[in-house]
Amino acid sequence: CHRQLGIGADGIIAVLPSETADLRMRIINADGSEANMCGNAIRCFAKYAYERELVKTTTFRIETFAGIIIPEVIITDGKVTAVRVNMGKPGTERPMIPMLGDEKEAIRVPVQVGDKEFQLTSLLMGVPHTMIFVDDLTTIELEKVGRSIEKHALYPQGTNVNFVEVVSSNHIKLRTWERGAGATLACGTGSCASAVASALNNHTGRNVSVELQYGRLDIEWAEDGTVFMTGPAEESFSGEIDLNEN
């Protein structure tokens, strides 16, 4: 995953057989830690599996450490151009995240970082996510604040940190500091979590376009609580790595 001496990536996705689903996904972050789920990875995984005929149907089941995830590939001219993913239901109670504290949920929790106080909203979207709503994304101290909250004592397993700028009732902008990967250009589970948090904080409705640095994701938080994510997936290149070489 090294940016200068290798391919460069936020992590490696392993495509594996499954006893409970069509395929199984494992994700190794750039720092060697393992993630339970990743929204961007699941779209790449789905495109890879369908186009290489590891699955035969446009909707299939993928086993992850966060449970069974069901993507639907969208085909244009025989190629997967987008993937709609049933991301399941968010966990809003602190023990599910996990996050310490006596309150049942974690909405607008005041936390001091250095000389600044932030209002945090946290939930589980396959992996723990914490949202901070800001007026202007260009002014945030992404690494400083992100790293401090990622490893804050409130989160025994750490947390991903999302900085959210609300543009309108159906449009937000997002920057993410990912647990185990640092600053990333996009985060699928973070987009889902941020859309849910925006609705919980009465900033938006339940259908939100999430603007990331190099694209958008469409997030729907259905009335039954299920979150659906729709976004693109593109292949950059293919190659081989000899694991026997140092």
Image (cartoon, grey):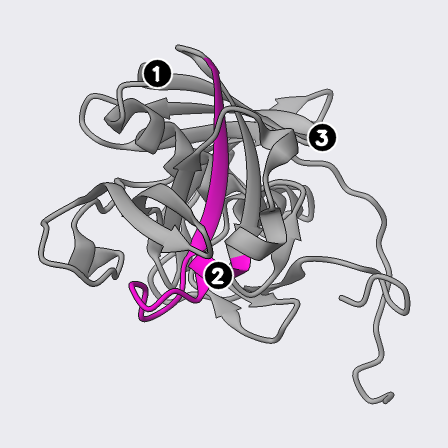
Out of 133 and 190, give the one closest to the viewer: 133
Q: Residue at x 35, y 47 (%)?
A: 125
- Asked if disc 1 and disc 2 are in contact, CB closer than 8 Å, the reply is no
Mark count = 3
Please rate how many residues cluster around mark 2, counting C-alpha atoms within 10 Å: few if below 14, some from 14 to 19, many from 20. some
- Distance between the Cα atoms at labels 2 and 3? 26 Å
Q: Of callouts 2 and 3, which one flags the residue occurring earlier in the amino acid sequence?
A: 2
Q: Is residue 125 above or below residue 2?
A: above
Q: Amino acid at mark 2?
A: Ser
Q: Of callouts 1 and 2, which one flags the residue occurring earlier in the amino acid sequence?
A: 2
Q: Which mark is residue 204?
A: 1
Residue 162 at x, y percent in the picture: 48, 42
Which residue is under mark 2? 148
Of tags 3 and 1, the one toward the viewer is 1
Which residue is under mark 3? 214
Q: Amino acid at mark 1?
A: Thr
Magenta-span inclusion, residue 197: no
Left or right, 164 with reference to 153: right
Left or right, 100 with reference to 137: left
Please rate how many residues cluster around mark 1, counting C-alpha atoms within 10 Å: few if below 14, some from 14 to 19, many from 20. many
> Which span is picked out in magenta?
147-167
Out of 43 and 198, give the one closest to the viewer: 198
Figure quadrant of the N terminus: bottom right
Residue 75 at x, y percent in the picture: 63, 24
Magenta-span inclusion, residue 163: yes
